[in-house]
Image: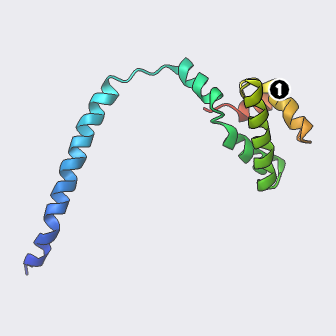
Amino acid sequence: GYSRDLQEDKPPVWDALDQTHGALVTLTGAVRTLKLRPERMRELVDANFAVATQLANWLVADRRVPFRQAHEIVGALVGSFSRAGRTFADVATVVEGLAAQGVEAGEAEMADVLDPL
C-alpha cells in the first residue's frame, strides 16, 4: 500500500530539482556567451606550470623514477624556472634541467609530455 511516511522525502527532492534547474539556466547563458581564447589559455598553462604534475607522472611511469624523487625533481625545476622567469614552454631548458638531474629525454618527447592537450 501507499505510505504517507515517504512524503517527507519529497520537499528536499523538489528543492534540489529547483536548484539544479536554476543552475542549468545560469550555465546555459554562460556557455552561450563563452569566448575561448586558445592563445591566452596556452599562456596561462605555461605561466602557472600547470603541466608540472604531468611531468612528475611521466618520470614515474616512463622513467621509473620513485614518486618522491620525481616530485623533488619537478619541484626543483619549477623553482629554478620561476626564479629565472622561464616557463616549461622552453622545452630545451626543461630537457637540460632533467639531464642535470640524471634524467635523459629528447626535445620531441618532452614537448609531447608537456603538451597540456
Mark 1: amino acid: Thr
Residue 96 rendering spot, x and y as whole percentages: 87, 30
Quarter occupied by residue 2? bottom left
Does 32 sit left or right of 36 as displayed?
left
Toward the front, the furthest residue is: 83
Secondary structure of residue under mark 1: helix
Rendered image quadrant of residue 113: top right
Q: Quadrant of the N terminus?
A: bottom left
Left or right of 3 on screen, residue 62: right
Residue 69 drawn at (x, y percent): 81, 52
Q: Is residue 16 above or below residue 27?
A: below
> What residue sits right under mark 1 in the picture?
93
How many other residues sit within 10 Å of disc 1, few (<14), some (14-19) or many (≥20)?
some
Q: Total number of numbered labels?
A: 1
Residue extending furthest toward the bottom: 1
Residue 105 visible? The answer is: no
Q: Residue at x 69, y 39 (%)?
A: 52
Q: Residue at x 56, y 18 (%)?
A: 39
- Residue 23 in the image: state x and y as whole percent: 26, 42
56 or 108: nearer the viewer: 56
Q: Is residue 107 visible?
A: yes
Q: Residue at x 49, y 19 (%)?
A: 37
Q: Position of residue 102 (x, y in %)?
A: 92, 42
The colour style of the image is: rainbow
The vertical placement of 116 against 10, above or below, is above
Question: Where is the C terminus found, in terms of image quarters?
Answer: top right
* Quadrant position of residue 87: top right
Considering only vertical position in the picture, is 88 above or below 76?
above
Q: Considering only vertical position in the picture, is 117 above or below 90?
A: below
